[in-house]
Image (tube, coloured by chain):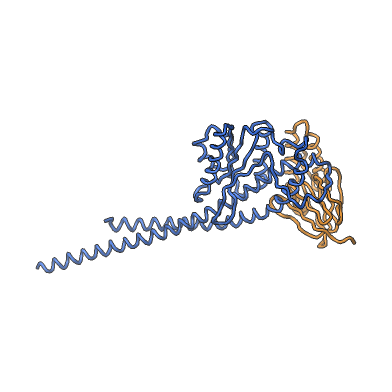
Chain colours: A blue, B orange
Amino acid sequence: MPNLKDLKNRIESVKNTRKITKAMQMVAAAKLRRAQDAAEAGRPYADRMTAVLGGLASSMSGSESAPRLLAGTGSDDTHLLVVMTAERGLCGGFNSSIAKLARVKADELVAAGKTVKILTVGKKGRDQLKRDFGDMMIGHVDLTEVKRVGYNDADKIARDVMGRFDAGEFDVATLFFSRFESVISQVPTAAQIIPASFEAPEEEASALYDYEPNEEAILADLLPRGVATQVFTALLENGASEQGARMSAMDNATRNAGDMIDSLTIEFNRSRQAVITNELIEIISGAEAL
Amino acid sequence: MAGTMQFDLVAPERRLASVQATEVQIPGAEGDLTAMPGHAPLILTLRPGVLSVKGTEGDTEYVVTGGFAEISAEGTSVLAERALPVSEVTSDILNEFISSAVEARDNATVENLTALTQQVSDIAVMAERLGIDLKAA
C-alpha cells in the first residue's frame, strides 16, 4: 500500500496540474475570441477577391495569354506542399492531424513518381515531418515572434512561394491548414493555390465589366494578391482552429485531473482509515492481553 | 439627385467603411475617376493616393496604397491592400509606405521598374497633398 505521505503529494501535484490546464483553457478561450474576430474581419475582403478573380479567371481561362499563375506550367511533376501548423503544442490532435494529411498526400505523390517539396509554416509541423521527409524540406517560415498574424505575414509567405514558382522550382502548390468549423471541430484541409483556382460565382457572370487598364493587366496585378489572400485566410482559420483545439484539449485535461483527484482522495481516505483501524486493533488486542 | 449607392472599403484585416454614398473619388492607376450611382460596371486598379467619399453621413477621406475597385450601378467596393482614414495617417506611416516602395523599386526587375518607380512618386504626391513631410526618399 502506498504510504499516506506519497498519496498526499500526488494529490497536490495533480491539483497543480489542474490549475495550469484550467488557466490554459481560459487563455485559449480569450485568444479564440480574438482569432475568430480576426477571421470574421478578413472575410469580406477574401470573398470579394474570390468573386472578382473568379469572374476574371473564367473569362480568361483557355485563352493563350492567361498568366502562368493561373494556367500553370503545363506539367505537374513537382509538387510543393505548404504545411501550416501551430508554433506551440498542447492543443490536442491539431498539429498531428494537419501533418498526417500532408504525410498521406506526400506519400501518394511520391508513389505516383512525382517530386515533392515541403515548405513548413509553424514549428510543430516541421518537427513532425522532419523525420520522414527531411530531405524534401526546402524551407521554413517562423512565426514564433509574431503575436498577431497580419496580412504582411501572409504576403511574405505568398511572395516566397510565388518567387519559387517563377524560378521554376515547382509546378503545383497545395496549402495544408485546418478549417475552423467550431470549437470542437476543426477540419484539416488541403487547398491548391498554384495554379490558382477560384470558384467562379454564377450570377456575377452576367454583369459585363469594363476593365481599366485592361483585363490582362488587372489579372496579373490581382493574382498575386489573390494568392496572398488565400494564404492569409488559411493563416486566420488556422489560428482560430489552434485556439479551439487547445481549448477543448485543456478542458478535457482539466476534467481528467478532477477525476484523478477524486479517485486519489478516495484511496487516501481508505488508507488513512486502514491505518486508524490497525492502530485500534493493536491497542485493543494489547489491552485484552493484559 | 440620382440617389445613393452602397460603398464598401475593405482591407484584408478589416472592413473600414460600409456606407451609403453619393459620390466616390477613386485614385485609379490611369488617373482619378469619380463613381456615382448608376455608373457603368468597371473594374480598375488603384495607385497609392487619397480616396474621398461623399456619403449621406458626411464626407470621409482614406489613404490607400493599392488594390482594386469594383464599380457597378448599385455600388462601389474598394479592396485596398492597405487603407486607413486620413485622420489616422502620420508621417511615420507614410515614411513606412515610401520606404517599402523604394525598397521594392530597388529590387525591381526590368519589367516592373517603371510601375514601381511610379508608385514611389505617387506616394510622394499624396504626402504633399496631405501636407505631411517625408524624409528624403
Left or right of residue A264, residue A195 in this image: right
* Residue pictured at 62% horizontal, 32% vertical: A77
Image quadrant where residue A228 sits: top right
Res. A49 visible in picture: no
Residue A163: where, in percent of width, then height?
A: 68, 35
The N terminus of chain A: image quadrant? bottom left
Q: Residue at x 40, y 56 (%)?
A: A14
Q: Nearer the viewer, residue A38 or A62?
A: A62
Compared across the picture, whether B105 is left or right of A230 comes to right
Image coordinates of residue A157 in percent, x first then y, are 64, 40
> Where does the C terminus of chain A fall, quadrant-wise?
bottom left
Pick the residue in front: A183 or A8.
A183
Q: Nearer the viewer, residue A248 or A113?
A: A113
Which residue occupies 86% across, 47% down? B32
Q: Is residue A60 visible?
A: yes
* In the rendered image, the vertical position of residue A174 relative to residue A29, given as above or below: above
Looking at the picture, tell me which residue is in the foreground, B47 or A164. Answer: A164
Residue A192, picture quadrant: top right
Residue drawn at the location 55% of the way across and 45% of the way down? A98
Residue A11, relative to residue B26: is it above or below?
below
Name the side, left or right, on which B109 lies relative to A235.
right
Is B7 left or right of A38, judged from the image as shown? right
Q: Position of residue B39 (x, y in %)?
A: 86, 53
Specify the quadrant of the image occupied by residue A122: top right
Residue that extends furthest to the left in the rendered view of this protein: A290
Picture coordinates of residue A51 (x, y %)? 74, 49
